[in-house]
Each structure stands twice: as C-alpha cells, then as structure tokens.
Amino acid sequence: MVISHKKKSIWPLPGGNYKYVDTLTKCLTFLSHGGKRLDEIEDWFVKNFDNVKKRGAVRGYLYVMIYYIPFIKNENDIFVLTEKGKKFLKIKNAETIYEILNSNVDGFEQIIEFIKSQRRTKKEIHDMLVEELNAKWKGYHQINYRLGWLLSLDKIKQKYNYYQIT
C-alpha cells in the first residue's frame, strides 16, 4: 500500500476521453482573452459542448483547472490564467499536464508502470489501484477518468478491452 498526500480522485473534462487536453486548451484560450465571470464560463461550456447541460458541472471542470491542473485561478470572482496556464498555452506540451497530474493525483504513474510490461484490462487496472492506493472505489468512475486523461495525453492506447503503452 502506498501512503500519499496526493488527491485520490480526478474528474474529466467534457468532449470525450480523447479530448480532455483539447477541451483544456480551448478553455484556456477562451480565458486568455481576458478574465471571465462564472456565468460567462458556464455559458461558454454549454454553448461549446453538447453534453454539458447543467451549469453546476462547470464548477467541477473549473475545480480541475484550479486544483488538479493549476492553470487558472479565481481573483475576486474573475477567472484568469495562472503563469503556468499562460506558459502551457504558448508551448502546448501535453507532457506538462501529465507531470502536473502525476504530482497532484494518485494513480497515474502506477497505471503507466502496471501496463508497461503487458497490456491490461480495466478490471486489472482497477484491482491494482484499489489495492495500491487502499481506495474504497466500488465502481470504475475513477479508473475511467484516469484512463481518459492518459488516452487524451497519448500516454496509453486502448485496443479492444485492453490498455497498453503508446
């Protein structure tokens, strides 16, 4: 069992498993044209992503971009890019996102190591992480989100029911 101060949970962004990085980049670009209020960001997400119907979900996406991948911050109810966010928009290096996620959230490095030598099923990855992290996950949501981020970052690929290193 690994004892860690990293976060045990992660959340997706809209757009689909392979699109988290694209969605993040689009949102940062939107915010780079001047700080935005919450209602403006909610409107932007609803307008740009068919699967975003509830404005409350947008707060979860902002939470990811503030606390998990600190590319934005809230300054007096106006959301603006951090220096890291500005830098990412200039270079658009997905490895930067992976390094940040890996340093802030448990499970990313463990998944990469686990599938490095052979392809694995989602169930095998789930069982390994539950044991490694002493997680109480009953379903696959947290595994799906991590796999979605890794797919979007092009760190892994999925072939049929298996995941492997790219």
Image (cartoon, rainbow, N blue to C red):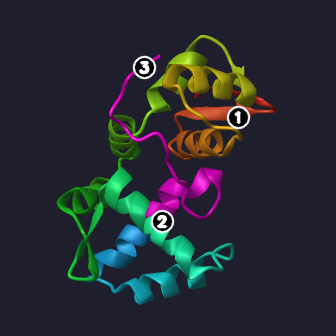
Earlier in the chain: of badge 3 and badge 2, it is: 3
> Pointer 3: what residue?
2
Quick check: can you spot residue 26? no
Q: Quadrant of residue 129?
A: top right
Does 17 sit left or right of 83 as displayed? right
112 is higher (above) or lower (below) than 67: above
x 68%, y 72%: residue: 51
What type is the residue that disc 3 sits on? Answer: Val
Query: Could you tell me the amino acid type at mark 1?
Result: Gln
Q: Is residue 131 magenta?
A: no
Cα–Cα gap, marks 2 and 1: 24 Å
Q: Which residue is mark 2?
A: 61
In depth, the one of 160 and 101 nearer the eye is 101
Q: Residues within 10 Å of mark 3 (few under 14, many from 20)?
A: few
Residue located beneath label 1 in the image: 158
Q: Is residue 70 above or below residue 7?
A: below
Q: CA distance from mark 1 to mark 3?
A: 26 Å
Residue situated furthest front in the rendering: 136
Label 3: element kind? loop
Camera-nearest residue between 61 and 7: 7
What kind of element bears circle 1?
strand
Highlighted range, magenta: 1-26
Q: Main secondary structure of the magenta part?
A: loop
